[in-house]
Image (cartoon, rainbow, N blue to C red):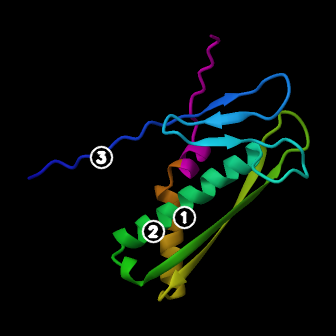
Amino acid sequence: MSELRVKKRDVGATALLGRNGHPQIATPTGGNLSVVTAASEPGFNPLDLLYSSLAACLALSARIAASRMGVLNRFEAVEAKVTGEKSEGEPARILRFDMRLTISGDFDEATKQAIAHEAERICTVSNTLRGEADFHLSIA
C-alpha cells in the first residue's frame, strides 16, 4: 500500500509597523497585505483578518466535506459569511462568532446541513478558536 504524502506549506505572518503608517503583513510564501486602522478606511483590519480566516477555512472545508460525502459532483459553490460580537470592556475579545454558510448545488436541506456541520468540524481555524491553544511570547 502506498503512503499518503501531504505537502507542508510554510505558515505564519510577520507584521512590521513603523512610527507612522499602517502595519505591513508578510507571509513566508510571499503574501503581502497592508492593514488598515481607521473605522472608515477600506481594507482589512485585524478583526477582518480573523473573520476572513474563519470564513475562508469554512468555505474550503465545505468543499472538502462535499467531496468526502461523495456529492462534490453536485456542489456548485459555497459562500461563508462570518461576523461576530466584540466585547465592550477589557480584555478586548470576540464574544461570539456568527457563521452563515450558503451552499449552492443540487442538495436537499439535510445534505446542506450535513455539509455545513462537517465543514465546521474539519476547519482548522474553528477548531483552534474553540480550543485552548498555547501562546508563547518571546522578545528578540
Q: Residues within 10 Å of mark 1 (few under 14, many from 20)?
A: many
- Which numbered disc flags the more N-terminal residue, 2 or 3? 3
Q: Which mark is residue 59?
A: 1
Look at the magenta stretch and give its main secondary structure: loop
Amino acid type, callout 2: Arg
Q: Which mark is residue 99?
A: none
Secondary structure at badge 1 equals: helix
Which residue is outermost to the top?
140
Q: Position of residue 106 (x, y in %)?
A: 47, 89
Q: Position of residue 80 (x, y in %)?
A: 62, 67
**Vertical comparison of 107 with 34: above or below:** below
- Which numbered disc flags the more N-terminal residue, 1 or 3? 3
Query: Residue at label 3?
Result: 6
Q: Quadrant of the C terminus?
A: top right
Secondary structure at badge 2 equals: helix
Report the side of 12 relative to 99 (left or right).
Answer: left
Query: Residue at label 2?
Result: 63
Amino acid type, callout 1: Ala
Q: Residue at x 54, y 56 (%)?
A: 57
Question: Which residue is nearer to you in this view: 35 or 57?
Answer: 35
Secondary structure at badge 3 equals: loop
Q: CA distance from mark 1 to mark 2?
A: 7 Å
Q: Residue at x 67, y 30 (%)?
A: 15
Is the Cβ of the residue at disc 1 closer than 8 Å to that at disc 2?
yes
Q: Residue at x 54, y 34 (%)?
A: 12
Q: Residue at x 89, y 44 (%)?
A: 38
Q: Which residues are magenta?
A: 125-140
